[in-house]
Amino acid sequence: MATNLKAKVDDFLSQKRIAVAGVSHKNPGNTANAIYKRFRDAGYETIPVNPNAETAEGVTCYKHVQDIPGHVDGVVIVTRAEYTDDVVQDCVKAGVSRVWMHGGIHGPGSSVSETAVSYCLEHNISLIAGACPLMFGTTSDGFHRLIRGVFGVMGRLPN
């Protein structure tokens, strides 16, 4: 299992089948939908997850990660932190070995839950706890790369 941020990011982004938990059927402009679309547009097989939606972004939306047919390589969690524990437990049941808990540019925008972090580590999940996947790789853009640089200088990137 990768131990530094660059290795974990490279490993996560090298996967091809990524679920995004928190995609909305009511608010297509939210952060989870933006991440979903960016991964989809970059060529990933991207699957939306939301227990309250039948469809999102014009495709079937799954209530739980374990409901998705076939193997999922990684899950980006873009929910409120109080829901993250349930999502990571679902990931373990689904056999997912990579999780990225989204972290926004402000504290309330974070999906990181300390109990979920502990749960992932206890279950051998490669975890990125914070930052936004749009800061890295083919899904990134200039604004997100700038924020990544600022977070790096400030020591706000996850380990």
Image: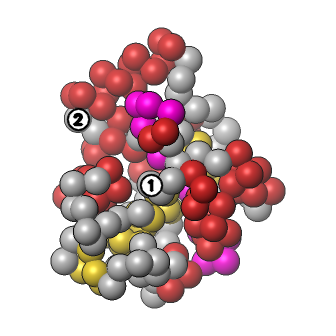
Q: Quadrant of the C terminus?
A: top right
Residue occupied by mark 1: 78
Looking at the image, residue 58 sits to the left or right of residue 25; the answer is: left
- The vertical placement of 120 against 62, above or below, is above
Secondary structure of the residue carrying numbered label 2: loop
Looking at the image, residue 150 sits to the left or right of residue 126; the answer is: left
Q: Residue 144, percent across and down?
A: 30, 31
- Mark 1 vs mark 2: give the one in front: 1
Residue placed at 69% from the left, 54% from the top?
116
* Mark seen at residue 109: none
Q: Which is more N-terminal, label 2 or label 1?
A: 1
Q: CA distance from mark 1 to mark 2?
A: 19 Å
- The vertical placement of 18 against 143, above or below, is below
- For badge 1, the amino acid type reads Val
| Residue interval drawn in magenta | 92-107
Q: Residue 114, percent across and down?
A: 71, 45
Residue placed at 58% from the left, 66% from the top?
87
Secondary structure of the residue carrying numbered label 1: loop
Front-most of residues 87 and 47: 87
Residue occupied by mark 2: 141
Is residue 9 visible in the rendered structure shown here?
Answer: no
Q: Residue 111, percent across and down?
A: 53, 48
